[in-house]
Image (spheres, rainbow, N blue to C red):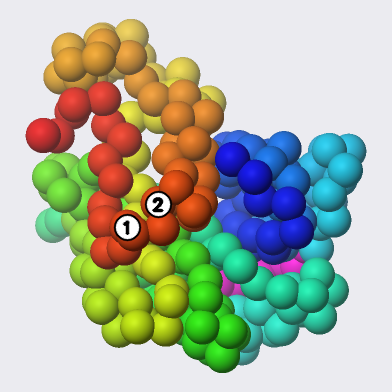
Amino acid sequence: MNFNGKTVLITGASRGIGFEIAEAFAKAGANLAICATHENSLVQAAEKLRALGVKVYTQAVDIANAQQCEDFIAGTVKELGSLDVVVNNAGITKDNLTVRMSEQDWDDVINVNLKGTFLMCKAALKVMFKKRVGNIVNISSVVGEMGNPGQANYVASKAGIIGLTKTLAKEFGSRGIRVNAVAPGFVQTAMTESLPEDIKNKALEAIPLKRFAKTQDIAKAVMFLASEDASYITGHILAVNGGLYI
């Protein structure tokens, strides 16, 4: 896929899935705007991405803050000249059983995962609306479709992203803006590697493909939805879960 001359904005891009997505777009020629909460991690990520020959704009952003989202979008357009694709990847977890979950843990996860996605979409849509073209890809989760014990806050946020994605697709399709989501299942990261073997084996038993996703699997799905190959796809939730939830 070719993204030469395009500007792609990715939240939570300093590590993990977000960095993998950024790297994939950079290899396809896109200039990047990346944000995270910590400046140090952004600097390190940007150095690696610039080595691929693309421009990279960085900013530390609390995506639950509307003004910071607006400023990041404005900075991106000013520094890179355009805004073509937005990938809302940033997210946190604060797991617990519902009866033990604090109100603060509920609010924190909803504010970052769901409100943050809404605020970044809102800020980006103001730019895309005027251009009458744009692409948004939100990162949901398989648990947003199937539920998961001990993650009421996270599940609610990811289910909310599905609803938000479909609504924005209907609201802005007439303006040439496509809005889709990717719903990953278990992904092979440092976190899953640290799980006890019995828990990993139990998870693998439930996955027909018998492996966790690689971060590259998620990045490729995001790139497809953002590409011209998906030009007639909007409001779609692309399951990348190995058959865990069918």
Decide: is 71 above or below 47.
below
Decide: is 110 above or below 54.
below
The residue drawn where x is 59% and y is 40% is 1
- Image quadrant holding the C terminus, namely top left
Secondary structure at numbered mark 1: loop
Q: x, y percentage for residue 155?
A: 23, 54
Secondary structure at numbered mark 2: helix
Residue topped by disc 2: 230
Q: x, y percentage for residue 180?
A: 35, 60
Q: Is residue 74 left or right of residue 210?
A: right
Q: Identify the image quadrant of residue 20.
A: top right
Residue contact at pointers 2 and 1, CB within 8 angstroms: yes
Gap between marks 2 and 1 measured at Cα:
5 Å
Q: Could you say which disc has been placed on residue 233 in the image? A: 1
Question: Does the segment drawn in magenta span residue 142?
Answer: no
Type of the residue with mark 1: Ile
Q: Residues within 10 Å of mark 2 (few under 14, many from 20)?
A: few
Q: x, y percentage for residue 242?
A: 26, 25
Q: Nearer the viewer, residue 130 or 111?
A: 130
Q: Could you say which disc has been placed on residue 198 in the image? A: none
The residue drawn where x is 51% and y is 45% is 223
Q: How many marks?
A: 2
Range of the magenta residues? 58-63
